[in-house]
Image (cartoon, grey):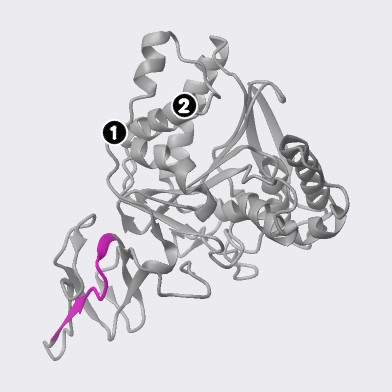
Amino acid sequence: MQVRKHPLSAPPANAVYELTSFHFGAPGSGKKVYIQGALHADEVPGMLVAQCLRQELSALEAAGRLAGEIILVPAANPIGLAQAIHGAAFGRFDLSTGINFNRAYKHVAEDLKQSLAGKLGQDAQANVRLIRAHARAAIAAWQPGTDAEQLKKTLMTLAVDADIVLDLHCDNEAVLHIYAGTPLAARVQPLAAILGAHAVLLAYQAGGEPFDEACSRLWWDLDAHFQHQYPIPPACLSTTVELRGEMEVSYELARRDAAGLLQFLTLEGVLRAADDAAAAAAAVLPAPLCAATPLEGVEPLYAPHAGILVYTRELGARVRAGEALADLIDPVSGETTVLRATVDGVFFARSAHRHVIRGMNVGKVAGARAYRQGDLLSA
């Protein structure tokens, strides 16, 4: 294992930040995998999973069982980790700009549409190598203006040419669910089954330029731009894994999730099984808990007024349109508003707050029919 430090702050600075990455295996020895935790720095479960992964990967490397390169960034947002408001961690937005740490990543396809003109051919693997080289160059040319932009450039430098990108997040309160690009639906299915995802949410473009899309969407955008004249596969399996809720931080869950990620990497040929029996066991997938659905089919539930929020359905429940999910009680008048789903689907996420104000997002239902457009992710 190699440990690398990446400075983020340009001198002179009032505060100095650096990012730490851990490197396992040898570059060019097989697939490249990038895994990060806590890009939203107050989302802790991914950091604990990364701690378990670091221990396991160190042992696997010592045993000669790595068949590729793995980069692990356990705490992907040192800027956000240093932020707090009145004693409460605040790592979702950059306090200096108000920008979400998982938005506004450079979409290098716009640069590559010009730099690749006349250079692609009919060899798919040669195209992949060429696109990755141009993507690295586009990120290298990015001139950040803030520490947060430097963080984004550093993360992209580590990940933009990877075969597999796993971005570990969590929701407020939720069952495990996954976001991925629509062209990656088949490839992400084993991961979803292994981890026990209750929802797999697919989109060609979610809006806002999140990190996972910055690594994956360039491939199908370039394929469309060049009108499918050249073989350009979706060469980066990049996905956001939402590890349940913010408070679900335990060794049991972290070890289980880390074991699932390692099983997936074994299936992907990045790790070598200890023996034939272990290889056969890794290939056995549990029955999936859900079918993939469009991100455009997610119904966000909003509070129509302030009040006490009492959920009447459990997370992971399959609901029908019209079914009640929660009561919203006005503590002054005593009147109760029943919040209902308007689509059939899975109730997969909800608010951890039990008193909410008007307009707050208090739940999400994953429906099978696409009906929304525009920016599809929550703020």
Q: Position of residue 258 (x, y in %)?
A: 41, 31
Amino acid identity at mark 1: Pro
In magenta stretch: residue 108? no
Does residue 185 lie above or below 99 as drawn?
Answer: above
Q: Position of residue 48 (x, y in %)?
A: 43, 37
Q: How far separated are the C-alphas under marks 2 and 1? A: 14 Å
Find the residue positioned furthest to the bottom. 333
Disc 2 and disc 1 in contact, CB within 8 angstroms: no
Q: Which of 2 and 286 lies nearest the eye of the viewer? A: 286
Q: Residue at x 80, y 59 (%)?
A: 113
Highlighted range, magenta: 336-347
| Label 1, residues with CA under 10 Å away: few <14, some 14-19, many ≥20 | few
The residue wearing badge 1 is 286
Amino acid identity at mark 2: Leu
Q: Which of 160 and 309 lies nearest the eye of the viewer? A: 160
Q: Secondary structure at mark 2?
A: helix
Q: Secondary structure at mark 1?
A: loop
Does residue 40 lie above or below 64 as drawn?
Answer: below
Which is the main secondary structure of the residues drawn in magenta? strand
Q: Is any atom of residue 253 visible in this view? A: yes
In magenta stretch: residue 343? yes
The residue wearing badge 2 is 267
Q: Does label 2 or label 1 sit earlier along the sequence?
A: 2
Does residue 40 lie above or below 231 as drawn?
Answer: below
Horizontal side, residue 172 vs residue 324: left or right: right
Q: Residue at x 68, y 54 (%)?
A: 218
* The label number, if any, that marks residue 137 in the structure image: none
